[in-house]
Image (tube, rainbow, N blue to C red):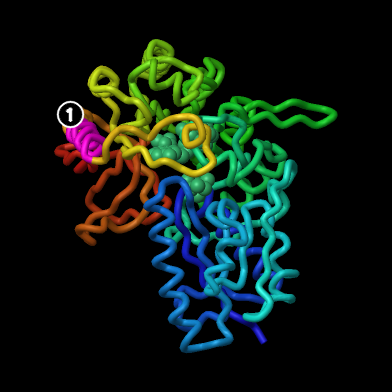
Amino acid sequence: MTKRAYIETYGCQMNVNDTEVIFSILKDAGYERTEKMEEAELILANTCSIRDNAEQRIRGRIEVFHQQKKQRPEVLVGIVGCMAERLKDKLLDTGKVDLVVGPDAYRSLPRLLEAVSPDHPQIDVLLSREETYADITPVRTDRNGISAFISIMRGCNNVCSYCVVPYTRGAERSRDAHSIVREACDVYARGYKEVTLLGQNVDSYLWKSSAETVDFADLLVMVAAIAPDLRVRFATSHPKDISDKVIYTMAAHPNICRHIHLPVQSGSSRMLALMRRKYDREWYLERVAKIRSVMPDCGLTTDVIAGFCSETEEDHQATLSLMGAVGFDWAFMFAYSDRPGTLANRTMQDDVPADVKNRRLNEIIELQNRKSLERYRAQIGQKHVVLVEGPSKRDPAMLCGRASNNMMCVFPAGDLKPGDYTEVTVVDSTSATLICQ
Ligand code: SAH
Ligand code: SF4
Ligand code: F3S
């Protein structure tokens, strides 16, 4: 009998993609996907450990899953992903979890599911130096059928002192370039018009076989060559590694989208050194200037952390002044969260009081909101080619889709359908949407 699996996904896009890999593996083990927890025999949460509040949220969900178990004792509950890797058998000690599987162990799911029962919980949290799931065709879970995410690498070899990812995802490894191109060709053949290449640090992508060496710029060229109407996006770029070769490659291919997510984290060189980001403020500003000199229309977004260990008011002002000088289109902004086991956790004091962290974060958010509005309003009068994704959330009579620079546009539906390209003119904007005609 076919069983049903329900998966909730938390954290980054890589986790969303991993959930698609998990569904593919579960399908081969006789499970079909359901979106209703109440009818599932297997309930999984694909989890994130990046900040403490991410983990607290999962703890709340474990309680909700446990209620299902109480009503239907045959239900199995599993925690997979980064929190599984970080907490390992501590999750089993809650008595509410039957299965714990780390990000590199999804191939063992069928075996673990054979063996598991409420009396015999199962765990596999081995990290791998090779696993990239290259041969597994993800079961796409996106709703629009237009835009697909493709993992090109796993893990991370940087040791940013605040970050758990190297511990939860293991060492960096790049996936076979040809398997990436095959997957992109496959989704294009199925009607998708956009692929986003995913990795924690895509600029350090490097795949070697006996015959060839492919770096990230080479990979971009290979994927862009699939079809002129297949858009290529990527994330995340690391400021220390983004090369001129990548910037010129983007500029040379109209179907590589003009958008770079370039997390700065802080505008203070002293903080960047403590964070072990391996670049300083000047280096970052130089990379931005290079990008804009080659592609003046390139969208730029970032991540910022407020209140990292020992951050002074002066460091904080340096972050604000950098954000003011660059003018990002959009940013993800966070208060620093001390993560067990990281370098910062072991060797530094999380000494910025919570109220100061939050005040600084709010100043950062307020500045960014102003900058976003400025950046979006500056687009009024511009023309953009937009890939139609589907109906606008606010107004179903309108459609939405992204410009090459990643700004969301809404425009009249006409006889357009998802997957079409259309040229629009910006007539108005909010700080997050371009209103177009
Ligand atoms: N690989 C990417 C980022 C991955 S994590 C990069 O290097 O840029 C996504 C974002 O979460 C980070 O850019 C950072 O801004 C934030 N983050 C990571 N660890 C954090 C922590 N301990 N506290 C607060 N924010 C954190
Ligand atoms: Fe974390 Fe740094 Fe790796 Fe990004 S590059 S995942 S912030 S360790
Ligand atoms: Fe979270 Fe793991 Fe991604 S910690 S941000 S799900 S790599």
The reply to whether residue 235 is in sight is no
Please tell me whether the stretch drawn in magenta is mainly helix, strand or loop.
Answer: helix
Report x, y in % for residue 367: 19, 30
Report x, y in % for residue 396: 23, 61
242 or 217, nearer to the observer = 242
Report x, y in % for residue 180: 65, 42
Q: Splitting the image into 4 quarters, where does residue 372 fall?
A: top left
Above or below, 44 against 356 in this view is below
268 or 254, nearer to the observer = 268
Name the residue at 27% across, 37% down.
Answer: 353
Region of the chain picked out in magenta, as a range: 355-367
- Disc 1 is placed on an element classified as helix
Name the residue at 47% across, 32% down.
Answer: 344
Above or below, 415 against 228 in this view is below
* 362 in magenta: yes
Residue count near mark 1 (Cα–Cα under 10 Å), binned few <14, some 14–19, many ≥20: some
251 or 6, nearer to the observer = 6
Tag 1 residue: 374
